[in-house]
Amino acid sequence: MQIELGFNAGNGFRNQPVVWDSGRLVNPHICIIGMTGAGKSYNLKRFVESLAATSGSHSYTAHVFDVHGDLQFDNASEVLFSEQTHYGLNPLEISPDPHFGGVRKRTRTFLNVIGKVSRVLGEKQQSVLRNLIYDTYENFGFHMDDPASWVIEQGSTVLPSKERFYIDVPYEDKSDASALGARWDPDARCWWCHFDDYRDGLTRWPPKHFTRTNPTLEDVLRYAKHINRCTFLGANSEACTKLEIVHKKANSFVRKRLKSLATQSGYTADKEAEELERAKQRAIESYTEYVNSVVSGKEVDQLLKYDSSDVLASVVDRLENLNAVGIFKAETPPFDTTKPIWRYNIRALGIEERSMFILFKCQALFEKALELGETDRIRETIVIDEAHVVMDDDPDNIINKIGLEGRKFGLQLLLVSQSPEHYPKDIMTAMGTKVVLGIDELLWKPAVGKMNIPLDALKWIILRKRFLCQMKWVGQAQSAWTYTYFRPINDTNKTQTGARS
Ligand SMILES: Nc1ncnc2c1ncn2[C@@H]1O[C@H](COP(=O)(O)OP(=O)(O)O)[C@@H](O)[C@H]1O
Ligand SMILES: [Mg+2]
């Protein structure tokens, strides 16, 4: 793939096109550095369109993260992301690759990103959250040490009805489910409730999926709340459910009695009283059983994993906040797969949310690239405007990993930022091509050191007219900075003279 960056200003090469050529460079990564108004967006658009235009007959996609919502392309598919949209991304989607994927790795990257963009979790909180995610995966049939269980069949995972929320209730729990208000659908052969009624005790049972799916953040949150309730009530799921049924029956008894008194109907609510009594008995049995089972240690382990209820409550709180961000949804965004440029308009998201979005999406793209295997060509470009919000020198940072390993797997980075200071050293050295559109005078000194760029070269730049670029060609030990014009020098002069006369 090729990009005509500009025209050479050097003696002896004057006006020769300066061409970026993926086939001859050590790696395809590009960074663009420019102060406000230097033309970052303008060049980003130009570069991406050239990449798409020269990608040949291969399938190629540029993923453009548009933080300001101002990057218009000719041949792009655009999707707006906000709390209101029903699609998003699922940070818990498992990669089935036995080496790079799996439950542990996914959980680790999830915790890493969360820690990076929002308040860092304490050690105890981290461990609680990790256990909650592990358990949720286990509940969804993903076993940590069994890579075969990480593979899921493609296909519809949606619930079959918009009115009925189907719940996966095991046979032995059916009377509990019924007592909590669930109903049986004989055709679907499944328990269900109305969407709004799926809360509290009923959430002990997960939603019924007719094919296996990845859990979502919401599933973790629901499970966390359930565990939280159990810890609070000091018992296991079984006993908690029975206690909740007691509350429900007591409620119904009291309501009936009050109504009967008010209407003087003489209804004694004996039936309700009896049901309440039975429910109490069952709860007592259940609690007794639980207390006795504590000796076996198994039940205690289950709860001890979750530390104190304070820690658990704080994790539930954090999960609730994350979920409220509204970008974590299982439904995939409706991009037009025939278009080479996908514009993720994330302007509506807050700063932390944008970073989370970009990092999780990059993680997913990287894993997909690994799955597809090694290649010589560029299959996908990740384009990040204002890239400083997601860059740091943590080797676990996905941007660093892509900088180091992306090339082999056909993944290119195009990073755009205002100052060289925004680029950690490792990312800077990983860039095969650097384009400097203009740097604020105050930052010249650090730029000279960091990018090994002569001060005189920086002084030579004229915004939107002259810029510098450096490309690392295969087989060349040193790469010089090329003094470049946007348009051929004489052409510009001619039109200017022409315009004057
Ligand atoms: N090389 C160029 N030739 C002509 N116009 C340019 C060039 N670079 C930038 N511009 C124009 O200058 C303005 C600012 O550019 P922009 O890309 O938005 O800057 P930045 O994103 O760095 O703040 C835009 O109107 C853009 O069209
Ligand atoms: Mg811009």
Image (cartoon, rainbow, N blue to C red):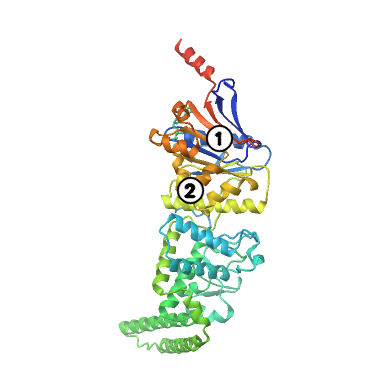
Image mark for residue 433:
none
Q: Dot 1 corresponds to which residue?
A: 47
What separation in Å lies between label 2 and label 1 (alpha carbons)? 21 Å
Name the spot of residue 278 as percent of width and height, x first: 46, 89
Q: Amino acid at mark 2?
A: Met
Give the secondary structure at mark 1: helix
Q: Label 2 CB, ligand 2: below 8 Å?
A: no
Please give the name of the residue rendered at 56% of the width and 24% of the height, measured from the top-left corner.
8
Name the spot of residue 330 as percent of width and height, x first: 54, 58
Determine contact: label 2, label 1, CB under 8 Å: no
Q: Quadrant of residue 277?
A: bottom left
Q: Nearer the viewer, residue 27 or 295?
A: 27
- One can see residue 159 in this view: no
Instruction: Determine whether 13 is above or below 217 in the image.
Output: above
- One can see residue 192 in this view: yes
Are there few (<14), some (14-19), or many (20+) residues within 10 Å of tag 1? some
Name the spot of residue 464 as percent of width and height, x first: 46, 28
Disc number lying in front (2 or 1) = 2
Q: Nearer the viewer, residue 153 or 25?
A: 25
Instruction: Determine whether 453 is above or below 110 in the image.
Output: above
Instruction: Determine whether 274 is above or below 125 in the image.
Output: below
Decide if residue 127 is on the left or right side of residue 2. Answer: left
Give the secondary structure at mark 2: loop
Q: Nearer the viewer, residue 171 or 121?
A: 121
Q: Where is the N terminus found, in terms of image quarters?
A: top right
Name the spot of residue 388 as percent of width and height, x first: 45, 45
Q: Label 1 CB, ligand 1: below 8 Å?
A: no
Q: Quadrant of residue 234?
A: bottom left
Q: Dot 2 corresponds to which residue?
A: 391
Q: Amino acid at mark 1?
A: Phe
Q: Quadrant of residue 243?
A: bottom left
